[in-house]
Amino acid sequence: MVNGRTPSVKDVARSAGVSLGTVSNVMNRPEVVSPATRERVERAMAELGFVRNESARQLRAGTSRTLAYVMLDGTNPFFHDVAQGIELAAEDADLSLFICNSNSRAEREEVHVDRLMQQRVQGILITPVNPEAGYLAEIARRGIPVVIVDRVGAGGVFCSVAVDDVLGGRIAVEHLAEQGHTRVAVVGGPDSIGQVRERVQGARQIWEELGLPPDDLIYLPTAALTVAEGRSAGERLAGIPARRRPTAAFCANDLLALGLLQQSIGAGLRVPEELAIVGFDDIEFAAAAAVPLTSVRQPRQELGRAAAQLVLDEATNPDHEHQQLTFVPELVARASTVVRSRGY
Amino acid sequence: MVNGRTPSVKDVARSAGVSLGTVSNVMNRPEVVSPATRERVERAMAELGFVRNESARQLRAGTSRTLAYVMLDGTNPFFHDVAQGIELAAEDADLSLFICNSNSRAEREEVHVDRLMQQRVQGILITPVNPEAGYLAEIARRGIPVVIVDRVGAGGVFCSVAVDDVLGGRIAVEHLAEQGHTRVAVVGGPDSIGQVRERVQGARQIWEELGLPPDDLIYLPTAALTVAEGRSAGERLAGIPARRRPTAAFCANDLLALGLLQQSIGAGLRVPEELAIVGFDDIEFAAAAAVPLTSVRQPRQELGRAAAQLVLDEATNPDHEHQQLTFVPELVARASTVVRSRGY
DNA sequence: AACGTTGTTTGAAATGTTTCATAAGCTGTG
DNA sequence: CACAGCTTATGAAACATTTCAAACAACGTT
């Protein structure tokens, strides 16, 4: 430390008896400097406790070393798994990952994105509150790579990585139908969330194709995708007269399903005999529930990893083309829908 | 956009017909510039799509606008709740929060911290793999505010915020003893994790004070604090001959407890009648488990918030004094230990 | 002895802001 | 009209790096 100030390359140069440029070379192109001087410079750095100033580096070099992910809901483990996938890809590319959380608030999201642009991050991965928001396209047009995660971007101005949510809804309900259920509840909401709309839509589609009466697919709206809302849906479900009551429920995500599961068991229902439950996402806690939860699996880490690769391609490859990647979801059948637990 | 390059203050100044300094004033001291010119400058900014370059700002101003949290384990919701608390405090102080994840790997942690120092973040909050690691003290000595979260920092060179883990272990086991259990398993590990050591120590302490035979407190070591390890502990527990088998278990965290709970129920045990279970942390999923989990609550968000406040104080208050804040944990009794569910 | 080659080091310019001392315009006062 | 006192605007310096053309040194070839 040089009299309180944190030491700069200049201090290192003086202390090692070389020029500024040489110190820079030691950091960025060590192969061009002779072993002897390199040694000397490195010793000086260690001695002074030199820490390179990233702001100055970035300002001059014009390139940052960070990626950013703006996640939609920090309370949902699903997004952390996605983030983990991004982190792994970032680590491979020797970049840092800046994780922000919009908590489903559009204003907060915009504040975060704004700051990220000021930081000149290499690219922005985002699960937006509203993928149609014009300002996202605006950013992409400015030349900053943007990848939409878990939603399909509007108008092809950016890359996106998502799972086919309609298909997910289909296979969930098809599975329930196969188990012999003819009255099924669909639990999810609010409607403003695109994922919810599509999953519900998939459920309706297959229900119709199977020739089942539309009135026997009962939609139970929720105010959010949380465990608490799942419990509340359970109470409403219990309130339906036994004759009309569904024997199975498809929940728009696992948090809802876990809430519903808990409420039902607490109320003395046997799962799956009296109520079968399917969730969506297949978060880790799904398998760990007391009655392991059948769920529609999304390749969570894979989603993140793929998104990171797209953003990196866009950032570095001059003839990058925008892509809309769609992954295929997959049903993971567990005890919450299958009566005799086969080998689980 | 100015011929491909992203526009700078200089471009804005030219376009608005004012000097560099005036543009800067519009951004930083709007009150000193006349409404008319301010208007003109702002219009020019919007027109060109100007985005302030944070690197340059930081380089010149010498002060960054970000805080960082290096979390220990991204798969544990506990840390996300802590992060959420930090985020809220950061938002209040108009700072960004940079979240990193060491995944319990010391090398990765060091890489992250190194980068954060290069970024000149205002302060580093960290739940370290090893709180004794010399390099942390080294950083603090350099004048960068460091706050240890969920552990007590060594040697008083930094602030720390933690919960009294020994006390937590005590109240958990005391609760089990009160319920009449006289053979109790303590599930946790690895021993390298300080939190685990102290919780186990608390359990042993109170067991001895209650005058119960040491051999009836059975330690079941685990390789990690995960759901899977909890399940495996459950299998080992089941393998103990019935006469010697514990009737209750205290798990060093909720993930273990959830795994143990699931395994036990799956194996046909009734909880809490045949096996009572207490966890630690009181994560959200604890309450949502099929048999709601009794747990030792840590004030998770509060922990984060307090840590952020300490780091900010250290960063801004010249006569800051290091503090070791300790929060008191609290038992939340639920159905996994209490036979008749009183009002839950 | 002159020359080219190769490997190493240097010095100055450039990056986009903020800051601060100074200048320029006004307005009202003696 | 001169001058003080404001309010606003300006221009240059400073921040810590990287980059790159140019200088230098050492050495073997012709």
Image (cartoon, coloured by chain):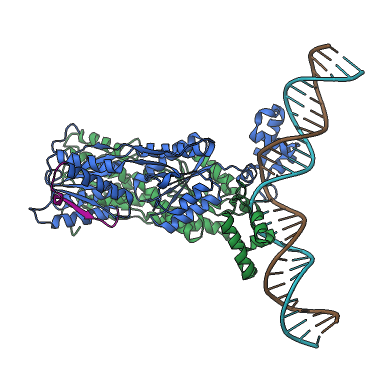
Chain colours: A blue, B green, C cyan, D brown
Residue stretch in magenta: A210-224
Q: Percent x, y for residue A133? A: 42, 54
Q: Is A220 one of the magenta-colored residues?
A: yes
In screen coordinates, is B33 left or right of A78? right
Q: Residue at x 33, y 50 (%)?
A: A194
In screen coordinates, is B288 left or right of B143? left
Q: Residue at x 22, y 57 (%)?
A: A232
In this figure, what is the number of numbered marks? 0
- Rendered image quadrant of residue A316: top right
Q: Percent x, y for residue A243? A: 7, 53
Q: Nearer the viewer, residue A101 or A181?
A: A181
Residue B197 seen in this snapshot: no
* As drawn, D5 above or below B204: below
- Could you tell me which quadrant the C terminus of chain B lies in? bottom left
In screen coordinates, is A85 left or right of C21? left
Q: Percent x, y for residue B191? A: 38, 38
Q: Is B158 one of the magenta-colored residues?
A: no
Q: Percent x, y for residue A235? A: 18, 56
